[in-house]
Amino acid sequence: MLSWYQYCYDSAMLKHHTTPLEARQKEFGDFLRSRRERLTPVSVGLPNGFRRRTPGLRREEVALLAGVGTTWYTWLEQGRDVRPSAEVLNALAEALRLDPAERQHLFTLADRPRPEQRATGAEQVPEALIRMLGSMTDQPAYVLGRRWDVLAWNDTATVIFGDFGQLEGDARNIMHMMFANVSHRRLLVDWGELAPLSLAMFRADSARYAGDPDFERLIALLKEESPEFRAWWPRHDVIRQPSTVKRIRHPSAGQLIFEYMSLDVTDHPGMRFVVCTPNNAADS
Protein backbone atom coordinates (compact mmCIF):
# COMPACT_ATOMS: atom_id res chain seq x y z
CA MET A 1 0.00 0.00 0.00
CA LEU A 2 1.25 3.47 -0.88
CA SER A 3 2.00 5.88 1.91
CA TRP A 4 0.10 9.15 2.05
CA TYR A 5 3.20 11.13 1.08
CA GLN A 6 3.92 8.88 -1.88
CA TYR A 7 0.30 9.19 -3.00
CA CYS A 8 0.46 12.99 -2.85
CA TYR A 9 3.78 13.01 -4.75
CA ASP A 10 2.49 10.71 -7.49
CA SER A 11 -0.68 12.77 -7.84
CA ALA A 12 1.33 15.99 -8.19
CA MET A 13 3.56 14.42 -10.84
CA LEU A 14 0.52 13.28 -12.82
CA LYS A 15 -0.87 16.82 -12.81
CA HIS A 16 2.42 18.31 -13.99
CA HIS A 17 3.00 18.17 -17.71
CA THR A 18 6.61 18.45 -18.82
CA THR A 19 7.11 21.43 -21.10
CA PRO A 20 9.42 21.33 -24.16
CA LEU A 21 11.85 23.61 -22.29
CA GLU A 22 11.96 21.29 -19.29
CA ALA A 23 12.45 18.25 -21.54
CA ARG A 24 15.34 19.95 -23.35
CA GLN A 25 16.95 21.03 -20.07
CA LYS A 26 16.74 17.46 -18.75
CA GLU A 27 18.25 16.13 -21.97
CA PHE A 28 20.98 18.77 -21.69
CA GLY A 29 21.82 17.66 -18.14
CA ASP A 30 21.77 13.97 -19.07
CA PHE A 31 24.09 14.65 -21.99
CA LEU A 32 26.58 16.51 -19.78
CA ARG A 33 26.58 13.67 -17.28
CA SER A 34 27.07 11.01 -19.96
CA ARG A 35 30.07 12.88 -21.40
CA ARG A 36 31.53 13.43 -17.91
CA GLU A 37 31.23 9.78 -16.99
CA ARG A 38 33.17 8.56 -20.03
CA LEU A 39 36.29 10.58 -19.14
CA THR A 40 39.09 9.73 -16.74
CA PRO A 41 41.25 12.17 -14.77
CA VAL A 42 44.34 11.04 -16.64
CA SER A 43 42.71 11.73 -20.03
CA VAL A 44 42.20 15.39 -19.12
CA GLY A 45 45.50 15.90 -17.29
CA LEU A 46 44.25 15.59 -13.71
CA PRO A 47 45.68 13.35 -10.97
CA ASN A 48 43.79 10.11 -10.45
CA GLY A 49 43.46 10.64 -6.69
CA PHE A 50 41.54 8.29 -4.45
CA ARG A 51 39.44 5.34 -5.52
CA ARG A 52 36.23 6.44 -7.20
CA ARG A 53 32.83 5.01 -6.50
CA THR A 54 31.47 5.91 -9.95
CA PRO A 55 33.18 6.07 -13.36
CA GLY A 56 34.33 9.26 -14.95
CA LEU A 57 35.19 12.69 -13.67
CA ARG A 58 33.60 14.30 -10.64
CA ARG A 59 31.40 17.32 -11.15
CA GLU A 60 33.85 19.57 -9.38
CA GLU A 61 36.58 18.44 -11.76
CA VAL A 62 34.55 19.37 -14.82
CA ALA A 63 33.68 22.69 -13.20
CA LEU A 64 37.37 23.31 -12.55
CA LEU A 65 38.33 22.52 -16.15
CA ALA A 66 35.55 24.72 -17.54
CA GLY A 67 36.16 27.60 -15.14
CA VAL A 68 32.67 27.61 -13.62
CA GLY A 69 31.31 27.07 -10.12
CA THR A 70 30.66 23.51 -8.96
CA THR A 71 27.17 24.34 -7.69
CA TRP A 72 26.28 26.06 -10.96
CA TYR A 73 27.55 23.11 -13.00
CA THR A 74 25.55 20.75 -10.77
CA TRP A 75 22.43 22.74 -11.56
CA LEU A 76 23.13 22.26 -15.26
CA GLU A 77 23.31 18.47 -14.85
CA GLN A 78 20.13 18.56 -12.78
CA GLY A 79 18.29 20.23 -15.64
CA ARG A 80 17.52 23.40 -13.74
CA ASP A 81 16.50 26.59 -15.53
CA VAL A 82 20.05 27.88 -15.99
CA ARG A 83 20.96 29.55 -19.30
CA PRO A 84 24.67 29.13 -20.09
CA SER A 85 26.22 31.58 -22.54
CA ALA A 86 27.97 30.55 -25.75
CA GLU A 87 31.32 31.18 -24.05
CA VAL A 88 30.42 28.82 -21.18
CA LEU A 89 29.16 26.19 -23.62
CA ASN A 90 32.46 26.34 -25.49
CA ALA A 91 34.32 25.98 -22.18
CA LEU A 92 32.21 22.95 -21.26
CA ALA A 93 32.78 21.43 -24.68
CA GLU A 94 36.54 21.81 -24.24
CA ALA A 95 36.46 20.42 -20.71
CA LEU A 96 34.44 17.38 -21.80
CA ARG A 97 36.55 16.84 -24.95
CA LEU A 98 33.52 16.98 -27.25
CA ASP A 99 33.94 16.33 -30.96
CA PRO A 100 32.27 18.69 -33.51
CA ALA A 101 29.01 16.72 -33.63
CA GLU A 102 28.78 16.57 -29.83
CA ARG A 103 29.60 20.27 -29.55
CA GLN A 104 26.79 21.11 -31.98
CA HIS A 105 24.44 18.85 -29.99
CA LEU A 106 25.36 20.69 -26.79
CA PHE A 107 24.52 24.08 -28.35
CA THR A 108 21.27 22.73 -29.77
CA LEU A 109 20.11 21.40 -26.40
CA ALA A 110 21.03 24.70 -24.78
CA ASP A 111 18.97 26.50 -27.46
CA ARG A 112 21.97 28.60 -28.41
CA PRO A 113 23.21 29.21 -31.97
CA ARG A 114 26.71 27.86 -32.32
CA PRO A 115 29.22 30.55 -33.38
CA GLU A 116 29.95 30.09 -37.07
CA GLN A 117 33.38 28.80 -37.85
CA ARG A 118 35.75 30.91 -39.93
CA ALA A 119 37.44 28.64 -42.43
CA THR A 120 41.12 29.17 -43.14
CA GLY A 121 43.75 27.66 -45.40
CA ALA A 122 43.42 25.86 -48.72
CA GLU A 123 40.02 24.41 -49.58
CA GLN A 124 39.77 20.77 -50.60
CA VAL A 125 36.58 19.46 -52.21
CA PRO A 126 35.62 16.04 -50.75
CA GLU A 127 36.13 13.13 -53.14
CA ALA A 128 32.54 12.01 -52.61
CA LEU A 129 31.35 15.38 -53.86
CA ILE A 130 33.60 15.15 -56.91
CA ARG A 131 32.06 11.78 -57.75
CA MET A 132 28.57 13.19 -57.27
CA LEU A 133 29.35 16.01 -59.69
CA GLY A 134 30.55 13.51 -62.27
CA SER A 135 27.37 11.45 -61.99
CA MET A 136 25.07 14.41 -62.70
CA THR A 137 24.57 14.61 -66.46
CA ASP A 138 21.29 16.57 -66.73
CA GLN A 139 21.93 19.27 -64.15
CA PRO A 140 24.72 21.85 -64.19
CA ALA A 141 26.41 21.76 -60.79
CA TYR A 142 29.50 23.20 -59.17
CA VAL A 143 31.16 23.69 -55.80
CA LEU A 144 31.84 27.14 -54.37
CA GLY A 145 34.45 28.00 -51.76
CA ARG A 146 34.07 30.45 -48.91
CA ARG A 147 34.94 33.39 -51.22
CA TRP A 148 32.61 32.11 -53.97
CA ASP A 149 35.51 30.74 -55.99
CA VAL A 150 34.46 27.88 -58.30
CA LEU A 151 36.40 24.89 -56.93
CA ALA A 152 34.87 22.04 -58.95
CA TRP A 153 32.20 21.58 -61.64
CA ASN A 154 30.65 18.98 -63.90
CA ASP A 155 30.64 18.75 -67.69
CA THR A 156 27.07 20.03 -67.93
CA ALA A 157 28.09 23.23 -66.16
CA THR A 158 30.83 23.69 -68.76
CA VAL A 159 28.31 23.30 -71.59
CA ILE A 160 25.94 25.86 -70.07
CA PHE A 161 28.26 28.43 -68.50
CA GLY A 162 31.55 27.93 -70.32
CA ASP A 163 34.79 26.26 -69.29
CA PHE A 164 35.70 27.32 -65.76
CA GLY A 165 39.05 25.68 -66.35
CA GLN A 166 40.00 28.51 -68.72
CA LEU A 167 39.68 31.02 -65.89
CA GLU A 168 42.43 31.58 -63.36
CA GLY A 169 42.79 33.27 -60.00
CA ASP A 170 40.16 35.89 -59.16
CA ALA A 171 38.54 35.39 -62.58
CA ARG A 172 37.24 31.96 -61.50
CA ASN A 173 34.96 33.59 -58.96
CA ILE A 174 31.18 33.93 -59.22
CA MET A 175 31.18 37.60 -58.23
CA HIS A 176 33.94 38.40 -60.73
CA MET A 177 32.03 36.50 -63.42
CA MET A 178 28.82 38.31 -62.49
CA PHE A 179 30.25 41.82 -62.55
CA ALA A 180 33.49 41.80 -64.57
CA ASN A 181 33.16 38.96 -67.10
CA VAL A 182 31.31 40.37 -70.11
CA SER A 183 30.66 36.95 -71.69
CA HIS A 184 29.13 35.51 -68.53
CA ARG A 185 27.12 38.65 -67.91
CA ARG A 186 25.52 38.30 -71.32
CA LEU A 187 24.27 34.82 -70.41
CA LEU A 188 22.03 36.19 -67.67
CA VAL A 189 18.73 37.41 -69.07
CA ASP A 190 17.78 39.10 -65.78
CA TRP A 191 21.20 40.43 -64.85
CA GLY A 192 19.74 43.69 -63.50
CA GLU A 193 17.74 41.77 -60.89
CA LEU A 194 20.21 39.00 -60.15
CA ALA A 195 23.37 41.09 -59.75
CA PRO A 196 22.29 43.16 -56.71
CA LEU A 197 20.74 40.04 -55.16
CA SER A 198 23.97 38.11 -55.60
CA LEU A 199 25.98 41.00 -54.19
CA ALA A 200 23.78 41.13 -51.08
CA MET A 201 24.16 37.37 -50.58
CA PHE A 202 27.94 37.63 -51.03
CA ARG A 203 28.10 40.49 -48.55
CA ALA A 204 26.26 38.43 -45.93
CA ASP A 205 28.65 35.52 -46.46
CA SER A 206 31.76 37.69 -46.41
CA ALA A 207 30.97 39.33 -43.06
CA ARG A 208 32.82 36.68 -41.05
CA TYR A 209 35.90 37.21 -43.23
CA ALA A 210 36.13 40.99 -42.84
CA GLY A 211 39.76 42.02 -43.25
CA ASP A 212 40.79 38.79 -44.98
CA PRO A 213 43.40 39.74 -47.65
CA ASP A 214 41.86 37.50 -50.34
CA PHE A 215 38.42 39.01 -49.84
CA GLU A 216 39.79 42.54 -49.71
CA ARG A 217 41.72 42.01 -52.96
CA LEU A 218 38.64 40.66 -54.75
CA ILE A 219 36.41 43.49 -53.50
CA ALA A 220 38.97 46.12 -54.54
CA LEU A 221 39.25 44.53 -57.99
CA LEU A 222 35.49 44.50 -58.48
CA LYS A 223 35.21 48.13 -57.41
CA GLU A 224 37.80 48.98 -60.02
CA GLU A 225 36.34 46.92 -62.87
CA SER A 226 32.58 47.27 -62.31
CA PRO A 227 30.78 50.61 -61.89
CA GLU A 228 27.69 48.74 -60.63
CA PHE A 229 29.64 46.92 -57.93
CA ARG A 230 31.36 50.18 -57.00
CA ALA A 231 27.96 51.90 -56.62
CA TRP A 232 26.14 49.09 -54.81
CA TRP A 233 28.78 47.86 -52.38
CA PRO A 234 28.52 50.92 -50.04
CA ARG A 235 24.80 50.24 -49.55
CA HIS A 236 25.58 47.31 -47.21
CA ASP A 237 22.56 45.33 -48.45
CA VAL A 238 22.44 41.76 -47.13
CA ILE A 239 20.13 38.85 -47.88
CA ARG A 240 20.15 35.06 -47.57
CA GLN A 241 18.33 33.28 -50.36
CA PRO A 242 19.32 29.65 -50.96
CA SER A 243 17.43 29.25 -54.23
CA THR A 244 16.30 31.37 -57.15
CA VAL A 245 15.28 31.03 -60.77
CA LYS A 246 17.72 32.20 -63.45
CA ARG A 247 17.14 32.54 -67.17
CA ILE A 248 20.15 31.80 -69.34
CA ARG A 249 20.59 33.18 -72.84
CA HIS A 250 22.62 30.31 -74.33
CA PRO A 251 24.41 31.05 -77.64
CA SER A 252 23.32 27.79 -79.28
CA ALA A 253 20.48 26.33 -77.17
CA GLY A 254 18.52 29.55 -76.81
CA GLN A 255 16.83 30.54 -73.55
CA LEU A 256 17.17 28.07 -70.71
CA ILE A 257 15.61 28.33 -67.26
CA PHE A 258 17.16 26.88 -64.13
CA GLU A 259 16.24 26.81 -60.48
CA TYR A 260 19.37 27.32 -58.40
CA MET A 261 19.72 25.56 -55.07
CA SER A 262 22.73 26.17 -52.82
CA LEU A 263 23.52 23.56 -50.15
CA ASP A 264 26.12 23.80 -47.39
CA VAL A 265 28.79 21.08 -47.41
CA THR A 266 28.99 19.33 -44.04
CA ASP A 267 32.27 19.78 -42.12
CA HIS A 268 33.57 22.29 -44.69
CA PRO A 269 32.65 25.77 -43.38
CA GLY A 270 31.89 28.19 -46.18
CA MET A 271 31.79 25.53 -48.92
CA ARG A 272 28.60 25.12 -50.96
CA PHE A 273 27.23 22.71 -53.52
CA VAL A 274 25.20 24.54 -56.18
CA VAL A 275 22.75 22.56 -58.32
CA CYS A 276 20.90 24.05 -61.30
CA THR A 277 17.70 22.17 -62.10
CA PRO A 278 15.92 22.78 -65.45
CA ASN A 279 12.61 24.51 -64.79
CA ASN A 280 10.80 25.29 -68.01
CA ALA A 281 7.56 25.72 -66.06
CA ALA A 282 8.92 29.06 -64.86
CA ASP A 283 9.00 30.41 -68.42
CA SER A 284 6.62 33.30 -68.72
Image (cartoon, rainbow, N blue to C red):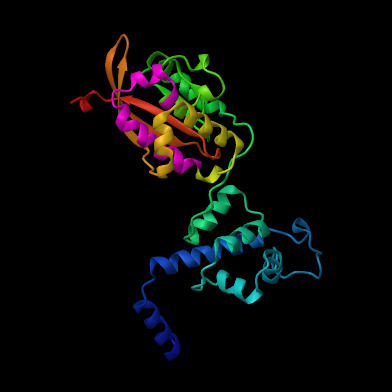
Q: Main secondary structure of the magenta part?
A: helix
**Image quadrant assignment for residue 127:** top right
Instruction: Residue lying at the far top in this picture: please name it.
Output: 252
* Front residue (pair 20, 182): 182
* Front residue (pair 139, 250): 250
Q: Which residues are magenta?
A: 179-206
Picture quarter with the C terminus? top left
Whether residue 195 is situated above or below residue 109 in the rendered picture: above
Looking at the image, residue 162 sits to the left or right of residue 171; the answer is left
Name which residue lies at 64% across and 60% down: 91
Name which residue lies at 52% across and 57% down: 107
Residue 170 lies in magenta, yes or no? no
Residue 180 lies in magenta, yes or no? yes
Name which residue lies at 57% across and 32% down: 217
Whether residue 253 is situated above or below residue 128 in the rendered picture: above
Picture quarter with the N terminus? bottom left
Q: Position of residue 79 (x, y in %)?
A: 51, 70
* Front residue (pair 55, 70): 70
Q: Position of residue 159 (x, y in %)?
A: 40, 13
Name which residue lies at 49% across and 67% down: 26
Q: Position of residue 262 (x, y in %)?
A: 41, 34
Q: Position of residue 267 (x, y in %)?
A: 55, 40
* Front residue (pair 50, 225): 225
Instruction: Residue lying at the far left in this picture: please name it.
Output: 284
User: How many numbered discs sit on the rendered protein?
Assistant: 0
Looking at the image, residue 209 sits to the left or right of residue 41; the answer is left
